[in-house]
Image (cartoon, coloured by chain):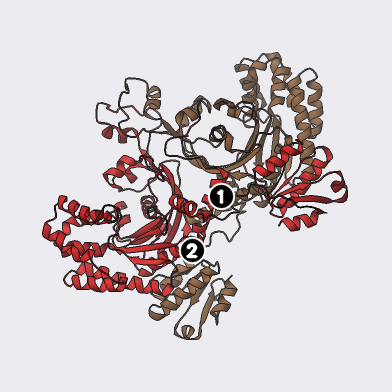
Chain colours: A brown, B red
Amino acid sequence: MKCSIPKGTRDFLPAEMARRNYIFDTIREVFKTFAFEPIETPSLENLSTLMGKYGEEGDKLLFKVLNSGDFMKDVDFNQDYHKVAPQICERGLRYDLTVPFARFVVQHRDQIAFPFRRYQLQPVWRADRPQKGRYREFYQCDADMIGSTSLLNETELVQMIDLVFQRLDIEVTVKINNRKILAGIADLIGAPDKLVDITVAIDKLDKIGLENVQKELQERGLTDGQIQALDPVFNLNGTAMEKLAQLEQLFADVPTGLKGVEEMRTLFTLIADIEPKCHIELDLTLARGLNYYTGAIFEVKAHNVSIGSICGGGRYDNLTGIFGMPDVSGVGISFGADRIYDVLTELDKFPADLGQAARAIIINFGGDEQRHAVKLASLLRKAGISALVYPEAAKMKKQMEFAAKKAIPYVLFIGESEAANGTVTIKTMATGEQQTIAQAAAIEALS
Amino acid sequence: MKCSIPKGTRDFLPAEMARRNYIFDTIREVFKTFAFEPIETPSLENLSTLMGKYGEEGDKLLFKVLNSGDFMKDVDFNQDYHKVAPQICERGLRYDLTVPFARFVVQHRDQIAFPFRRYQLQPVWRADRPQKGRYREFYQCDADMIGSTSLLNETELVQMIDLVFQRLDIEVTVKINNRKILAGIADLIGAPDKLVDITVAIDKLDKIGLENVQKELQERGLTDGQIQALDPVFNLNGTAMEKLAQLEQLFADVPTGLKGVEEMRTLFTLIADIEPKCHIELDLTLARGLNYYTGAIFEVKAHNVSIGSICGGGRYDNLTGIFGMPDVSGVGISFGADRIYDVLTELDKFPADLGQAARAIIINFGGDEQRHAVKLASLLRKAGISALVYPEAAKMKKQMEFAAKKAIPYVLFIGESEAANGTVTIKTMATGEQQTIAQAAAIEALS
């Protein structure tokens, strides 16, 4: 029988787990100090909850779970497979954490005090074509605040991003835009119905360049005049505040645009107040693929690595509307743990001492000495020190090799004389140094 | 659009998350101090990895995931649904953590130093009929040591069980048996081929009583003589050691049974040495449904509640054999987080202060005071204190109600005079007491 796991999925060995947990713990700790509360939703959702929420492409990428029992009963299989699938699958795997959160808020509205801040660290599944850095099962780390339109929320999210990457020692730029400014631009050039086309095209500016974006806009039905009218937008310059001033001029007759400019001014003022360590940038090319953002849009890029965005988010005014609860505004961010992992690896920024299997191993001499070893192990653990007794009275060489392979920093010996004297011999593996001291002193020293 | 989640699944609100994390953290902490290392395996496994490992019933309870794309291509749907399912589903959801661990060990054998101790806290999925305390998605918390036959391993598992339930403040009995003793009993009554029938029947002794067990054994083809020959086994008495002595007599000509008795003697001696706080019991009726145990079998029952076993495990000599890696012995335990949750709830043993949304909330007076509030929040968080500023300058009553609903213990006010003096007014919600002190002192006091 061959051993393998499905394409696009991964096993995590202890060393990887330690590095992943370092990322998760850092993010979780920041979420907590900002008073976000944890929730979890089921991996399985009703397909009716998920379908139609991620666009046509998203629907295709949903993992569908076969109904239990006789799933074939009363199903006509002489149809297209797209039609058959929802008849034999009532449930699917979570595709992101945002839609389940919206469903959660609506379903538990009576148990929640608004404004509600929740964080959620759980895996999601997408039947995407696997490739470097893209997996079919991966974790998302989301924080959302819902039930408040105050821009203080956006500010705190930026502050959280700043803190997380400070603690992870990654230099980043937080790019900020506002969907209302994008809508204003569409209004400005007289193409309000083309907002999505424009933003999708603008979103690609970084990847395909201005000329190709203009070509794409043409293909999407914009006139040459409209495309030319976009030029001043691509040519804004100066600081964020200066760009906003230029936009204000352009938007003289575009109320949505003006509202966006006003929001961004307030936000940039609030952000200046918190004195972030990271670089903050107004980036009008930032649109992100998601259709539900209505206000601020965030994206975070790490410096000195060519890896896509490692965090993103924005404000959505209508997310719970699809579940029958309108007018609840929310804003949130999502950290991409896998990409952060890759950034830390590439920049060599993981702390060196992550993921010790144990702090101490006690060599097993069998017989009565083993009893002393077991007793000392209990005392070490009681003091919070991770320790193990080698389970067999194997040859010393084998036990020492095991300690070395596991990179356990301290090897302890209780032979006949140590047992008689209540002492223990400690070998510090890094230096080879060895000393015999009282057991109580050893516990103290290893703490 | 109606909001609901699939039958047998659950959302976890912050209060439940805090209680669940209390359980997970306690277990994880003990695992770690015993030098177990974390791993994770994918939620999705190839169905070929899972099928046939959990018996016929288990195969039915596997959640199967529909293939992506045109899953209907080249499939003949004029067959029984059992035949069709594996043709349209290549993958399934993890059913437990043991089989994936076995697959993991074989697949990564070259990267693992044996003996290997791993722990794993992940959800599993079963298409079981949902009922009170039984869910379709639930967490397992497993610790296994693999690559060593030493009974020191079993001893440490008992010690871990003892510690976990000490820390959770639950009184428990650890029941221990040995599959070799059960096999010895089958040999003893001349029905070695009926081992599984006998153990399945014995397993039910607690639930259906001796008479029904005897009836069931009859139905399973045991003769009256064989059933009578079982009597002395049901009538053993005294301490574990005394029972083992009686068994030794019965097993005079039964080598497997004698080996089991010897193992149990060693184990009970080792356990006595570690002086567990919990009750330890030799229970020959303990068989557990699983077929792969070959040595020790464990089960843990909480006192003073009528809830099934909250932890179980045992030794298996052949687990990785199914994946082509024979002769690797392992022993492990699995904590049932959901049942432990129910026990703690029923005994009212959850600590009272779990799951604070925040330690402090700062009232938002808007304008310039808001800026001071934001600044103080930053300082509190830097000191590791979870804090939030109410995001809007809402009416005082509304903000205070929010603080009360969230059970935030300290409410902070920075009005004009506090802002001018660098002070803050702290209200302790439990007592209603209020005092105005320097902000630095407040941070100190809240730490």
| Chain of the residue displaying label 2 | B
Left or right, residue B317 beside residue A99: left
Left or right, residue B381 beside residue A374: right
Q: Quadrant of residue A145?
A: top right
| Chain of the residue displaying label 1 | B
Helix, strand or loop under label 2: helix
Q: Which residue is mark 1?
A: B18
Residue A289 in view of the camera = no
Left or right, residue B156 beside residue A332: left
Instruction: Name the residue: 15% across, 52% down.
Output: B218
Q: Quadrant of the C terminus of chain A?
A: bottom right
Residue A174 in view of the camera = yes
As measured in the structure, the alpha-carbon distance from the residue carrying label 2 to the one carrying label 1 is 19 Å
Please provide percent x and percent y for residue B276.
43, 69
Q: Which mark is residue A134?
A: none
Instruction: Name the residue: 45% across, 57% down.
Output: B119
Instruction: Name the residue: 37% across, 21% down.
Output: A80
Q: Which residue is mark 2?
A: B166
Please provide percent x and percent y for residue B228.
15, 61
Query: In this orientation, which residue lies closer to the viewer: B420 or A436?
Result: B420
**Is B15 situated above or below A351?**
above
Please provide percent x and percent y for residue B196.
22, 54
Instruction: Name the residue: 51% across, 80% down.
Output: A424
Q: What's the amino acid at mark 2? A: Gln
Helix, strand or loop under label 1: helix
Left or right, residue A149 beside residue A308: right
Query: In this orientation, which residue lies closer to the viewer: B433 or A374?
Result: B433
Q: Are the residues flagged by discs 2 and 1 in contact, CB closer than 8 Å?
A: no
Q: Residues within 10 Å of mark 1 (few under 14, many from 20)?
A: many
